Image (cartoon, rainbow, N blue to C red):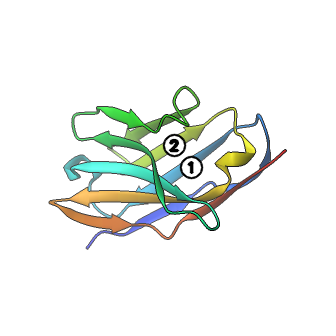
Amino acid sequence: QVQLVESGGGLVQAGESLRLSCAASRSIFSADVMGWYRQAPGQEREFVAGIVRGATTKYADSVKGRFTISRDNAKNIVYLQMNSLKPEDTAVYYCKGIYRSHDYWGQGTQVTVSS
């Protein structure tokens, strides 16, 4: 079992930045993939960013150039740096870890961007 705990969400104005953190109870170095997803009210959960074991990153087109995913293997934390935030980025952000084909999710953290 892996526990993932997100933090760092909040209310910001458009154009501002936030950094989300995802603390894992197991080594993230051993994870196949660590990623961030988001779900806006009335919408399906969607992929935002991911980082695979070899440090290859992938982003949704809507956040490319604005968001950066990174990890600190020593602390077992995955970060999502979000710059130039837009109102359409408002959602609950979830951390996901894939360990040996098993999916684990955090409880989510709310990000609200006002215009």
Which SS class for mark 1?
strand
Is residue 58 positioned above or below 1 on the image?
A: above
Q: On the picture, is 5 further left or further right than 34?
A: right
Corner quadrant of residue 72: top left
Evaluate if marks 1 and 2 touch, with contact meaning CB atoms under 8 Å apart: yes
Q: Which residue is depicted at the point 33% across and 44% down?
A: 74
Q: Most extreme residue toward the left, as rendered?
A: 100
Residue 8 location (% of width, % of height): 62, 54
Corner quadrant of residue 97: bottom left
Is residue 35 positioned above or below 86 on the image?
A: below
- Circle 2 Cα neighbour tier, 10 Å, few/some/many (<14 / 14–19 / ≥20): many
Is residue 49 positioned above or below 105 on the image?
A: above
Residue 47 location (% of width, % of height): 44, 50
Give the residue type at disc 1: Leu
Query: Mark number for residue 20?
Result: 1
Residue 107 location (% of width, % of height): 50, 71
Q: Which residue is depicted at the point 23% across and 41% down?
A: 53
Q: On the picture, is 49 further left or further right than 11?
A: left
Give the residue type at disc 2: Leu
Q: Most extreme residue toward the bottom, as rendered?
A: 1
Which comes before the other along the chain, label 1 or label 2?
1
Mark 2 = which residue? Answer: 80
Quadrant, the C terminus? top right
Query: Mark number for residue 4?
Result: none
Q: Which residue is depicted at the point 38% across and 58% down?
A: 96
Which SS class for mark 2?
strand
Q: CA distance from mark 1 to mark 2?
A: 5 Å
Residue sitting nearer the eye, 51 or 48:
48
Residue sitting nearer the eye, 82 or 4:
82
Q: Which residue is depicted at the point 30% across and 69% down?
A: 2
Residue 20 location (% of width, % of height): 56, 49
Quadrant, the N terminus? bottom left
